[in-house]
């Protein structure tokens, strides 16, 4: 993933290059920034309550005088790590589901994909909120809940890939050797579909970022003193009349990240499609 | 077509049942009762409360009771707002939510289809590039950003429209506009793609070589085919629109059911949250049925089969 981003950063079109560089910059800032900045995310600067951007506070300060730049970067850390963990959860659910449905075929496939279709139409973010209400606020819950929304796309894609792999000779020979279904799926199907599946999984990252910021915006996700882009935007909305920068900077970071992810995602998808159609041709030619 | 629709109706009912069951058991799984406060209640009071809210019976019995209550259209009392039933809250909020959501959907379809059509008819033109650029940004701007920024720009700075509340028609302009932006962008991209694709189909070439005027080709030969993907997008879009309307109601201070949902979630009002999720799920399934039946009428492959 990181390698592909780096590759695009050096070789892609100018738009793709801009996006991958911006994305890498956000990630590096989120990782290293907070330690390099003189201000602590929870430190109050009594000399500068709610001040506009200046040399000492690049993004200004919030209502109670905390440096917005460092808080935005901490928020980036939280938002991005939730997005990555939730994406991993969606991989863990979506890949086996799709591979099993595609491998089994027939009735089982129909039922499993019908379940995916059905879930697709539901307001799942609201169900995650329901989980939060029931079990209290808990970051792990947020990871699992969000991951459980986003596996649906992945299951569809993996199923499509599996339908191709299923006809291969090595699957037949595994079956003739009498391997149980779960072992065939685990050892022979999944390794052959996992590459494209992981690339597609990165497409869910912007979706998770948006969902997390939505829940946190409503005050039901990440909580003070911890922060995320959603929390910062909610705070900024409260104080935007007197200090618009508290809204604009976190919003800019969120929108830029999601936009770059979307653009790169489109690029990945195009490249994957070209690659898979090429291998498909090679397989059918040999 | 009748068989297709009957199957769809069946799936919707099953889905609805699954949702209701899921929600019910989730709520009952909750650690601690809904009345756990700072102070322990005397056991008699707690028993009375549990009896009043039907929590003292065995779980299976509660489940059956809840289902039959739902069937008669009763969502139960609110745990926190003592004098209100969930029905009253939903009924008071629904008109506002439906107005905002309906207007947003309308704006999104109108703006999205016309922008997508303009771009798709001339792929690679300047209009196409502008539309694609704007929609790219639109998709990356969630409601939580668009809504406050809209207030900042149109209410605080320009002072054109009110920043919130309900009253005259002017209160119903900004919220739907803020809500519809990402959906308008998504619809524009979908329309653009399928219009550009349909444009190169043989039947469109035939219509052109017959010398039909362009507006007629668009209306009769391109749009009916190109809009099918847009139509099937409306199902998931409605679900996402509802989610977004929760934010819009919060930001613009509108008394819709989305705000009750957030309030209920913040102070753990189980029955209210449950009721709103059930209402939302029902609305989405109903809307999906509507989309499916329109689809069935428009798509000859379904219209002419069974």
Image (cartoon, grey):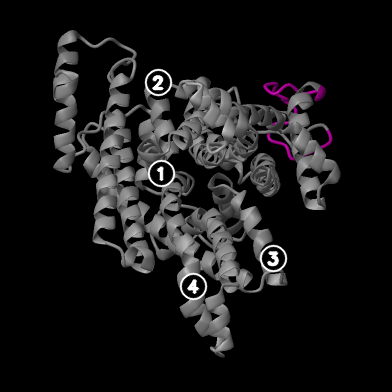
Are the residues under marks 2 and 1 on the same chain?
yes
Residue extent of the magenta highlight? A36-55
Give the x, y percent position of residue B164: 46, 52
Q: Secondary structure at mark 2?
A: helix
Residue where numbered disc 4 is placed: B223
Label 2, label 1: how many angstroms apart (C-alpha)? 27 Å
Q: Main secondary structure of the magenta part?
A: loop
Viewer-nearest of labels 2 and 4? Answer: 4
Using residue B224 as the reference point, say whether residue A239 is left or right of it.
right
Give the x, y percent position of residue A172: 52, 31
Q: In this view, which residue lies farthest toward the bottom?
A: B211
Using residue A269 as the reference point, say whether residue B299 is left or right of it.
left
Give the x, y percent position of residue B209: 58, 87
Are the residues under marks 3 and 1 on the same chain?
no
Residue where numbered disc 1 is placed: A117
For image coordinates 27% across by 19% down, the residue present is: B35
Residue where numbered disc 2 is placed: A135
* Position of B219 relative to B135 (above/below): below
Choose the circle earlier in sequence order: 4 or 3: 3
Label 3, label 1: how many angstroms apart (C-alpha)? 34 Å
Q: Nearer the viewer, residue B278 or B199?
A: B199
Are the residues under marks 2 and 4 on the same chain?
no
Residue where numbered disc 3 is placed: B130
Are the residues under marks 4 and 1 on the same chain?
no
Are the residues under marks 4 and 3 on the same chain?
yes
Choose the circle earlier in sequence order: 2 or 1: 1
């Amino acid at each position: 993933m990181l390698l592909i981003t780096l590759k695009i950063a050096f070789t892609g079109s100018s738009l793709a290059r801009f996006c991958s560089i911006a994305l890498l910059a956000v990630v590096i800032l989120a990782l290293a920034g907070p330690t390099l900045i003189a201000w602590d995310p929870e430190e109050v600067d009594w000399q500068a309550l709610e001040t506009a951007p200046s040399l000492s506070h690049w993004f200004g300060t919030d209502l109670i005088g905390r440096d917005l730049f460092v808080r935005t970067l901490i928020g980036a850390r939280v938002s991005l790590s939730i997005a990555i963990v939730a994406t991993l959860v969606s991989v863990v659910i979506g890949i086996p589901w799709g591979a099993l449905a595609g491998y089994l075929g027939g009735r089982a496939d129909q039922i499993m994909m019908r379940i995916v279709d059905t879930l697709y139409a539901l307001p799942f973010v609201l169900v995650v909120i329901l989980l939060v209400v029931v079990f209290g606020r808990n970051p792990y819950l947020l990871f699992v809940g969000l991951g459980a929304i986003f596996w649906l796309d992945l299951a569809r894609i993996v199923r499509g890939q599996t339908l191709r792999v299923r006809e291969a000779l090595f699957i037949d020979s595994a079956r003739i050797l009498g391997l149980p279904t779960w072992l065939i799926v685990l050892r022979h199907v999944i390794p052959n579909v996992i590459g494209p599946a992981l690339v597609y999984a990165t497409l869910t990252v912007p979706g998770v970022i948006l969902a997390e910021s939505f829940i946190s915006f409503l005050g039901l996700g990440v909580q003070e003193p911890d922060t995320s882009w959603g929390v910062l935007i909610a705070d900024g909305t409260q104080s935007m009349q007197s200090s618009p920068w508290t809204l604009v900077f976190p919003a800019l970071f969120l929108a830029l990240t999601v936009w770059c992810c979307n653009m790169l995602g489109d690029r990945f998808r195009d490249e994957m499609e070209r690659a898979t159609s090429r291998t498909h041709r090679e397989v059918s030619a040999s | 077509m009748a068989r297709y629709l009957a199957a769809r109706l069946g799936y919707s009912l099953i889905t609805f049942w699954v949702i209701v069951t899921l929600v019910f058991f989730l709520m009952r799984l909750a650690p601690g009762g809904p009345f756990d406060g700072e102070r322990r209640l005397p056991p008699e009071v707690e028993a009375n409360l549990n009896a009043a809210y039907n929590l003292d019976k065995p779980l299976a019995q509660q489940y059956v009771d809840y289902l039959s209550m739902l069937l008669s259209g009763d969502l139960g009392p609110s745990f926190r707002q003592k004098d209100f039933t969930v029905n009253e809250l939903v009924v008071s909020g629904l008109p506002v939510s439906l107005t905002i959501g309906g207007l947003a959907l309308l704006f999104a379809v109108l703006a999205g289809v016309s922008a997508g059509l303009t771009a798709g008819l001339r792929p690679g033109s300047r209009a196409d590039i502008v539309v694609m650029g704007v929609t790219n940004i639109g998709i990356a701007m969630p409601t939580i950003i668009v809504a406050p920024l809209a207030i900042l720009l149109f209410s605080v700075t320009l002072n054109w429209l009110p920043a919130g509340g309900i009253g005259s028609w002017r209160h119903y302009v900004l919220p739907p506009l803020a809500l519809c932006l990402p959906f308008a962008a998504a619809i524009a991209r979908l329309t653009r793609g399928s219009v550009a694709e349909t444009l190169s189909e043989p039947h469109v070439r035939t219509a052109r070589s017959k010398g039909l005027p362009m507006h007629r080709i668009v209306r009769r030969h391109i749009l009916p085919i190109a809009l099918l993907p847009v139509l099937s997008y409306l199902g998931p879009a409605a679900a996402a629109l509802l989610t977004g309307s929760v934010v819009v109601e919060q930001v613009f201070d509108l008394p819709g059911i989305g705000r009750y949902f957030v309030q209920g979630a913040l102070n753990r009002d189980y029955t209210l949250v449950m009721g709103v999720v059930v209402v939302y799920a029902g609305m989405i399934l109903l809307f999906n049925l509507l989309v499916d039946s329109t689809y069935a009428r428009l798509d000859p492959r379904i219209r002419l089969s069974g």
